[in-house]
Image (tube, helix red, strand yellow):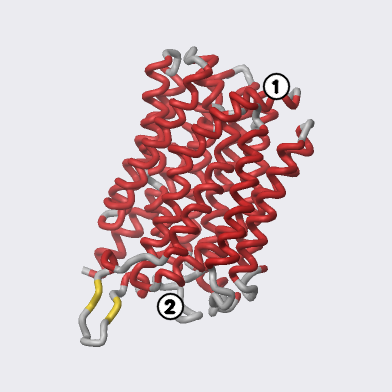
Amino acid sequence: MSSPSSTKPDTSAAAPLTGDGGGTVPAGKVKLPPVVWLLGAVAFIMGTSEFIVSGLLPQISGALDVSVSGAGTLITAFAVGMMIGAPVMSVATQRLPRRSALVAALLVFAAGHVVGAFSSNLPLALVGRFAAALGNGTFWAVGAVVATAAAGPAASTRAMGVMVGGITLANIVGVPLGTAAGQLGGWQVPFWLLAALAVAAAAVIARRIPADTTRASTSLRAEATALRHPRLWLVYLAIALIQAGLMAAYSYVAPLLTDRAHLATALVPLALLGYGVGALAGTTVGGRLGDRRPYATLFPATALTTALLGAITLWATNSVVAVVLVVLLGTAGFANNPIVVGEVVRIAGAGRSLPMALATSAFQIGIATGSWLGGLALTSSLGLRGPSLTGFAFALAALLPLGLLAASHRRAESAQS
């Protein structure tokens, strides 16, 4: 870990383990402990909850007697809860036992879904989504520290990969299955299922994570010092703009596919499955290429995302074309995620919970802003073209901070050579 007064990247996470004989154990050979996979499974539950509303907007709007864009505020409320919850709970739980914090987070998350399932009006549903998001934010603030501490320095990056992989898997499996369940049994069904899974996960965590799990060893002052690097804030800006571009379009993918592209409602879960498969492919490619050449991968991926959003705006009037473009959007958009998170770690230093929590907030700022403005565009004269056109504008704007970061990265590499 870097010293409290330093903002230089901490390379300890990449350091190999040294055995008694002085040899090294490559990071890829270190076996991840079961707790990491447990937290990855919880991340799957959290990711399913975050994105499930997108596939059920028509059903929710009908049940709550609001417009589709009004129902879309449930996505915004969740994002705002995450945006606030991650950094606040990172600070608030810094000196609490990690097991207790994780159990409490899951119970709050479950309670939020119970409130949502009982909701007969939009305000109550918004309260439930906000509460669930606070639980989600707490989980990420604490779970990332628990996973990396359990894995050790040589495997901390892989541990985070498992947790992020849980979200990607949620897009592939959880969201399509939850959408199908909501269409067949009512939109409340996936809410009840997520609440039950969260309670079960809390029980498992209470048994499997040791009571003496280490507390934070860093001070709030050291965490704040790591935020002084200007490049870190450019990364946060890029994260927010990229996510706003994606979510402005994806939040309203169901009406796009059914009303504009004339896809049968029953096939929407399959289209979401395709988006999730594309997201997994993008995450995998981005993670592999981004380690070696982060900005040579990140900038083209964002440019492709921008082009795809433009194409959706212009040509997503045919069901086949629309589905192909949505799948490709998942691939290009999610290729960015492991790279930008890796840049936060490199700039702020490994083991810093507050910079990582603020990265989560940046993601959620983008999701909240994109879903909100996408909803406004949907109700404007632009109609069903509005969300993707809004996303196009955000993705195009993201190229500016990425260009500045790429130039700074090149100057740093030249100075070292």
The amino acid marked with disc number 2 is Met
Q: Is residue 200 above or below residue 227?
A: above
Q: Which part of the image, by quadrant, shows the N terminus?
A: bottom left
* Position of residue 370 in the picture relative to residue 306 (left or right): right
Q: What secondary structure is marked by label 2?
A: loop
Q: Nearer the viewer, residue 31 or 249?
A: 31
Q: Position of residue 202 (x, y in %)?
A: 61, 58
Neighbours of disc 1 within 10 Å: few (<14), some (14-19), many (20+): few
Q: Nearer the viewer, residue 31 or 391?
A: 31
Q: Position of residue 245 (x, y in %)?
A: 49, 37
Q: CA distance from mark 1 to mark 2?
A: 52 Å
Q: Which residue is mark 1?
A: 62
Residue in the picture at 30% in, 77% down: 17
Q: Nearer the viewer, residue 102 or 224?
A: 102
Choose top left, top right, bottom left or bottom right for residue 11: bottom left
Q: Is residue 289 above or below residue 148?
A: above
Q: Position of residue 58 (x, y in %)?
A: 63, 23
Q: Which residue is mark 2?
A: 1
The amino acid marked with disc number 1 is Gly
Neighbours of disc 2 within 10 Å: few (<14), some (14-19), many (20+): some
Q: What secondary structure is marked by label 1?
A: helix
Kindly check if marks 1 and 2 are in contact, taking CB atoms under 8 A apart as contact.
no
Q: Which part of the image, by quadrant, shows the C terminus?
A: bottom left
Residue in the picture at 63% in, 56% down: 106
Residue in the picture at 38% in, 17% down: 320
